[in-house]
């Protein structure tokens, strides 16, 4: 399980360091793709294969299912870690997430999320303002 948040920089060659505590769980290769809320998702191969399998079973007759599949699968790319634990962030994903030089790598259960630092701060502040309402809705889901 991935937990915690870390601030890193993307260098001029579009390389992003991944926190050392996450690297062993990610293995030698991972998959980076478009995430929700305009961040990026980084999955270990096993978790990615499970998610991709679920997406492939969604009904083609439903527009939302097709769109979600396209968002996640067509935007995905396998990445490898260099000797310093960095991955290359493709331009199209960097643009999608609006990543600047400073980014936050956040552990969110089975995946990592990669956010532009400013967007992450704004998102957290918004969630914190509504934490009571969110907790009420989660109670209805049994959390």
Image (cartoon, helix red, strand yellow):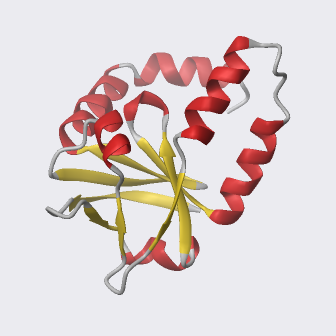
Whether 91 is drawn above or below 15: the answer is above
Image position, residue 57 (x, y; %): 85, 34
Q: Quadrant of the C terminus?
A: top right
Whether 124 is drawn above or below 61: the answer is below
Depth check, front residue: 102 or 6: 102
The structure residue drawn at horizontal position 35% and vertical position 87%, both measured from the top left corner, is 83
The structure residue drawn at horizontal position 48% and vertical position 31%, both measured from the top left corner, is 36
**Apparent side of residue 66 relative to residue 20 in the rendered image (left or right):** right
Image position, residue 73 (x, y; %): 62, 41
Q: Residue furthest bottom?
A: 83
Whether 113 is drawn above or below 44: the answer is above
Image position, residue 61 (x, y; %): 83, 14
The structure residue drawn at horizontal position 17% and vertical position 63%, both measured from the top left corner, is 11
Depth check, front residue: 133 or 36: 36
The structure residue drawn at horizontal position 48% and vertical position 38%, both measured from the top left corner, is 35
- Specify the quadrant of the image occupied by residue 43: bottom right
Q: Quadrant of the N terminus?
A: bottom right
Image position, residue 109 (x, y; %): 58, 53
The tally of labels here is: 0
Depth check, front residue: 108 or 137: 108
**Apparent side of residue 22 relative to residue 83 in the rendered image (left or right):** right
């Amino acid at each position: 399980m991935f937990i915690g948040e870390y601030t890193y920089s993307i260098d001029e060659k579009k390389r992003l360091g991944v926190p050392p505590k996450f690297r062993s769980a990610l293995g030698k290769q991972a998959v980076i793709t478009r995430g929700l809320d305009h961040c990026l998702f980084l999955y270990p191969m096993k978790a990615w294969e499970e998610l991709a399998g679920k997406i492939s079973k969604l009904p083609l007759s439903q527009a939302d299912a097709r769109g979600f599949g396209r968002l996640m699968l067509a935007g995905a790319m396998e990445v490898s870690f260099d000797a310093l634990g960095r991955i290359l962030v493709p331009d199209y994903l960097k643009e999608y997430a609006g990543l600047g030089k400073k980014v936050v790598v956040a552990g969110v259960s089975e995946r990592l999320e990669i956010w532009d630092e400013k967007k992450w701060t704004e998102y957290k502040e918004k969630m914190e303002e509504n934490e009571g309402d969110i907790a009420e809705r989660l109670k209805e889901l049994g959390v």
